Image (tube, rainbow, N blue to C red):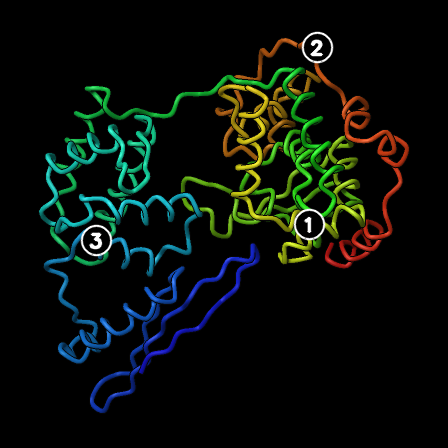
Amino acid sequence: MGSITARKSADGSVSYRAAIRINKKGYPAYSESKTFYSKKVAENWLKKREVEIQENPDILLGKEQLIDLTLSDAIDKYLDKVGSEYGRTKRYSLLLIKKLPIARNIITKIHSIHLAEHVALRRRGVPNLGLEPIATSTQQHELLHIRGVLSHASVMWGMEVDLSNFDKATAQLRKTRQISSSKVRDRLPTKEELIALTKLFAERWKLNKYGTKYPMHLIIWFAIFSCRREAELTRLWLQDYDSYNSSWKVHDLKNPNGSKGNHKSFDVLEPCKTIIELLLDNEVRNRMLRLGYDEQLLLPLNPKSIGKEFREACKILGIEDLHFHDLRHEGCTRLAEQSFTIPEIQKVSLHDSWGSLQRYVSVKSRRNVIQLEEVLRLIDERAAKRKYSASSFFRKQCSISALYS
């Protein structure tokens, strides 16, 4: 009645799809599936679900009882139905919430006290789960994710969830500053910090020829010159690069209404093209491809490891309060300093609205900004000599790209 199929994603991770198919006399054909990241969890769900169907055949008619649905079960059901429409961040947040005490409550009986207790717990941290205290803005995001599940249960499953009480509770938590909206970060890396990071990453790459597979000395500058988010870097397919028109399509861009299917192309400027050529160098690609990810990706790497490499380097160099995402801010700032208009910046950054780019309107040019030529000297003196000569691999990919244009 049930089966489990292993699936390998583009980033190399393995998931397990548990599927149930039933053809029972007197009932319509029935099928149901869920995806898990552990084979054991998939097997346990399959066994449990088969027993539930045997004990309650009305499930085959779509008449499943949802009276005592816990938040944990509701999250599972929600992710199974619409989880693929959202990005990795929301999915990860909901799976994390499942591990916390609030997830044990029946969703029709979640009250303000439960939300207050959840916020207090997250503010203290959860040592037994290895969770550090989180910011008030992260708290707000978690509650919004919970509300999304409750709202879906109310509208789509016909459950009597008190969303009005939920909204009143979150409004009070916001009023008492226990949760809050995200603050706009103004942190930019200094020239000295960028030089130090580039030198450290370049030395690691040269000295550890058979070790590190992450060309971070190139990745940080690609992030700056392309204005891409960390998660987008490892989702750039070579076939989507239109070198003739200097554009690259990004799949499933972050969006408040869901990232699935939100594909947009960004302008690839000359400094970015130079870094792309270096990333497509045969030696660089061969080292990255040893990790086993898809060879049709510009960066066949694990996005989480990119962030980890960056944080570790900042710690080694004593660089404080610098996030990988700040490199995107650096890239947008550089464009503003070059007198790019807001619409022109948006063509590169692909921000959802001009409103989020308003802070770049009155940017004053910095005098001490590291330029591409100096970056190339830091990376490798030979790089400066070859920066405008594409590798054989690059020329091959340009031909492939032309076929898809």
In the rendered view, tell whether residue 258 sits above or below residue 377: below
Residue mark closest to the camera, 2 vs 1: 1
Relative image position of residue 264 (x, y in whole percent): 59, 44
Task: Tell me the number on the disc at residue 153.
Answer: 3
Q: Secondary structure at mark 1?
A: helix
Q: Amino acid at mark 2?
A: Asn
Going 60% across and 42% down the picture, which residue do you hit? 233
Q: Amino acid at mark 3?
A: Ala
Please name the residue that numbered disc 1 is placed on: 288
Q: Residue furthest bottom?
A: 25
In the rendered view, tell whether residue 250 sits above or below residue 172: below
> Between marks 2 and 1, how big is the CA–CA gap?
33 Å
Going 32% across and 64% down the picture, which residue do you hit? 41
> Between marks 1 and 3, how big is the CA–CA gap?
44 Å
Relative image position of residue 400 (x, y in whole percent): 78, 57
> Toward which corner of the image does residue 228 lie, by quadrant?
top right
Q: Amino acid at mark 1?
A: Met
